[in-house]
Image (tube, rainbow, N blue to C red):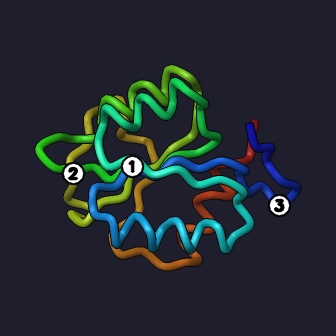
Amino acid sequence: MGRISNDGIPGDVLIVEDDPIIALDFEDTILGFGVKTVRIAANVAKALELIEHRPPQFALLDVGLVREKSFAVGERLQALEIPFAFVTGYGADATLPAAFATKPRLPKPCSTDALQALLKIGGVKS
């Protein structure tokens, strides 16, 4: 499992995103921050399988996947106390379940700076 670096960037990030172009763009950007491992899941089942195999240090969850929402992944991450954030093309109007009301969220598309700041905040262990 990757370690959190001195600058607070996690070593292993899971991206849950059903659009392959967006997922690859996130992956390229995140690797550019110095993250060692980025794994991508296009659906809830694959994401849960990846988490079970090796929990990430941070995760980015697209809210709306094909025919499903990523909330089951969020519940699993929350149970494991793994920081995560939602990414949504629906903006601030996206309704999240009450359990996730305080989780950070990024608009899609988001700036590189906003993504890097989110990873640093999420990667820092309290």
The residue indicated by pointer 3 is 7
Give the class, few, some or many, for how many residues have Cα within 10 Å of label 2's Cα (few <14, many ≥20).
many
Rendered location of residue 82, percent (x, y): 58, 33
Closer-to-camera residue (15/46): 46
Disc assigned to residue 64: 2
The amino acid type of the residue labelled 3 equals Asp
* Left or right placement of residue 95 versus residue 123 in this view: left
Q: CA–CA distance between discs 2 and 3?
A: 31 Å
Disc assigned to residue 113: none
Kind of element beneath mark 1: strand
Kind of element beneath mark 3: loop
- On the rendered image, what quadrant is the C terminus found in? top right
The amino acid type of the residue labelled 1 equals Val
Q: Residue at x 29, y 60 (%)?
A: 88
Q: Nearer the viewer, mark 3 or mark 1?
A: 1
Disc assigned to residue 16: 1
Of mark 2 and mark 3, the one earlier in the sequence is 3
Q: Residue at x 46, y 49 (%)?
A: 85
